[in-house]
Image (cartoon, helix red, strand yellow):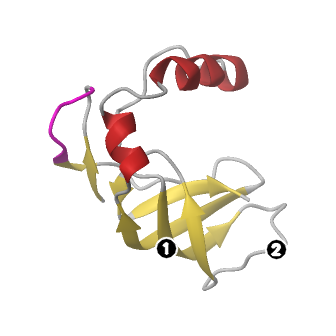
Amino acid sequence: MRAWQSELFGADCQLKEKPLPEISAPNDLLLKVKAASVNNIDVMMKKGYGNEMFTRWRQLKYQQWEPPSRLPLTVGRAVVESVGRNVTRFKPGDEVIASWSRSIRERTRNTS
């Protein structure tokens, strides 16, 4: 799948081929992105705003120590493609407004 992303703060975004995300937890949703917006907070975060706080949060919550890709998206419109076994509120075909911070990509995984 295609994804716009930037590996460094302040660097230009590049269109890259990435593996299709998969359901990996019981509360996950696989979403097909239909529309994405780039907002002021996305621009500020790409410049480094909030990096220290979000890095510490990822370390505590996910035990993830490597820095993530610097990606410019926090909100968009998507359609649910598949759901994890514990998801009851959403079903494939549902249209949703999603919030994430991975990238502007064709598909993404969110937690319900």
Give the residue at x 71% y 79%: 91
The CA span between labels 2 and 1 is 17 Å
Specify the quadrant of the image occupied by residue 69. Answer: top left
The circle on residue 89 is 2
Which residue is at 20% across, 48% downward?
A: 16
In terms of depth relative to the viewer, which is nearer, 73 or 1? 73
Residue 23, x across and y down, in percent: 62, 55
Magenta includes 65?
no
Badge 2 amino acid: Arg
Q: Is residue 4 above or below residue 92?
A: above
Question: Start and end of the magenta stretch?
Answer: 9-14
Q: Is residue 56 left or right of residue 108?
A: right
**Residue placed most toward the observer, 52 or 58:** 52
Residue at image position (60%, 76%) is: 96
**Which callout, 2 or 1, points to the residue nearer the camera?**
1
In the current view of this chain or complex, which residue is farthest to the bottom?
Answer: 93
Residue at mark 1: 77
Q: Is residue 17 left or right of residue 89?
A: left
SS at badge 1: strand
Which disc is residue 26 wearing? none
Question: How many marks are shown on the rendered structure?
Answer: 2
For the stretch drawn in magenta, what is the main secondary structure?
A: loop
Residue 105 picture location, percent across and down: 35, 58
Q: Decide: few, some or many residues near mark 1? Use Cα within 10 Å; few <14, some 14-19, many ≥20.
A: some
Kind of residue indicated by mark 1: Arg
> Where residue 1 sits: x, y (%)?
30, 59
Q: Is residue 11 magenta?
A: yes
**Res. 112 image quadrant:** bottom right
> Which of pointers 2 and 1 lies earlier in the amino acid sequence?
1
Image x and y of residue 39, in percent: 38, 56
